[in-house]
Image (spheres, helix red, strand yellow):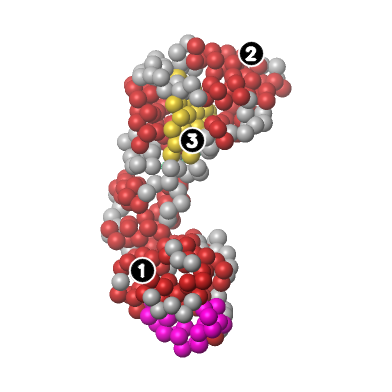
Amino acid sequence: DSYLNPHYTFDNFVEGDCNRLGRSAGLAVAERPGVTSFNPLMIYGGVGLGKTHLVQAIGNYIKDRYDNKFVLYVSSEKFTNQFINAIRNNTLQAFTNFYLHVDVLILDDVQFLAGKEKTQETFFHIFNHLHQSGKQIIMSSDRSPRELQGMQDRLLSRFKWGLTADLQQPDFETRIAIIQKKLQSDGIYIEDKVIEYLAHSIDTNVRELEGVIVSLMAHASLNRREIDMDLARATLKNIVIDNEKEVTVDNILDAVTNHFDIDLSELKSKSRKRETVFPRQVAMYLMKEFTNLPLKSIGYHFGGRDHSTVIHAVQTVSEMIEQDKDVEKTMQTLYRRFNRVRS
Ligand code: ADP
Ligand code: MG
């Protein structure tokens, strides 16, 4: 058994700027394992960005192509546990021998080996042997080899022999494509604007994006309804509430000055320039939304303006959100800075 999950394939790994290098290097390795200079192939990137999917896709591809190659996928955690058991049971020889017979070794999450000297030592020997015999080694890590602490230098230097490619956060277009692919494979249709809303609201990682889609599908089927904008909003709201933190005046001033790239002193000034007035109104609107401050106190944060100015600002921004798509987007972006979704 290779411990590969057949669902992870290249076909359903959506390509985007965020993963192009890793994906094409992976494909090159899959087509000619052990032969390219991408040995080892090291894929690194944050949680939920597709490392396991990609390295398993390589394994599945090789397994389908060559039925005489022994492809083995193992997490570093499992590798470590096997090693510890082997020591305990006096079967270290058998453990090592097993790994020396692998044609393609896929070791997932190598950062887990950090600080585990003995395990690293054994992996070092396995690595050398396989590499010398022209066998392919593929690894993943949640950080680059440069940032891998607690790892022996001799191992790290070997990681750099081949190719290191990172997976980044998917951009908006890739997120759309990932959602579409997922819906397609489940035979579900939802409107483009709902897809866009989801892609816009969830920009952390692919796993989270998939989680929301799965929970949307569950809600839809439980309540026998379609996945529309209302359901999407409600679902997202529930999910996001989990990590809501209090939003303070400083958070808001920070977010607004950052987003609009203006100085705090300018924001608080008497200036009536358009470039200043709008951000100031937005800041007031957000304070009204997120804090319990009375309108008068909100005005106080902006050079002692009175409460009617604040009311006017809140009204203006509310109307603009309704009428102007760009303003709506701006507000969504700001909300997301506070881990909130506008609904
Ligand atoms: P990691 O190992 O980096 O934490 P995973 O490989 O487990 O991330 O990916 C998390 C989820 O996101 C998986 O269900 C995976 O299939 C999916 N996924 C990640 N990247 C893509 C992509 N480019 N296209 C399609 N699905 C993806
Ligand atoms: Mg993983």
Label of residue 93 in the image:
2
2 or 1: mark nearer the eye: 1
Label of residue 328 in the image:
1
Quadrant of residue 300 within the rendered picture: bottom right
| Above/below status of 309 relative to 31 | below
Q: What kind of residue is marked 2?
A: Gln
**Disc 3 beta carbon < 8 A from ligand 1?**
no
105 lies left or right of 15? right
Q: Which residue range is magenta in the image?
A: 297-318
Q: Is residue 162 magenta?
A: no
Point out the tag, 1 or 3, that comes first from the N-terminus.
3
Quadrant of residue 314 within the rendered picture: bottom left
Q: Which residue is mark 3?
A: 44
Quadrant of residue 156 within the rendered picture: top right
Point out the tag, 2 or 3, that comes first from the N-terminus.
3
Point out the tag, 2 or 1, that comes first from the N-terminus.
2
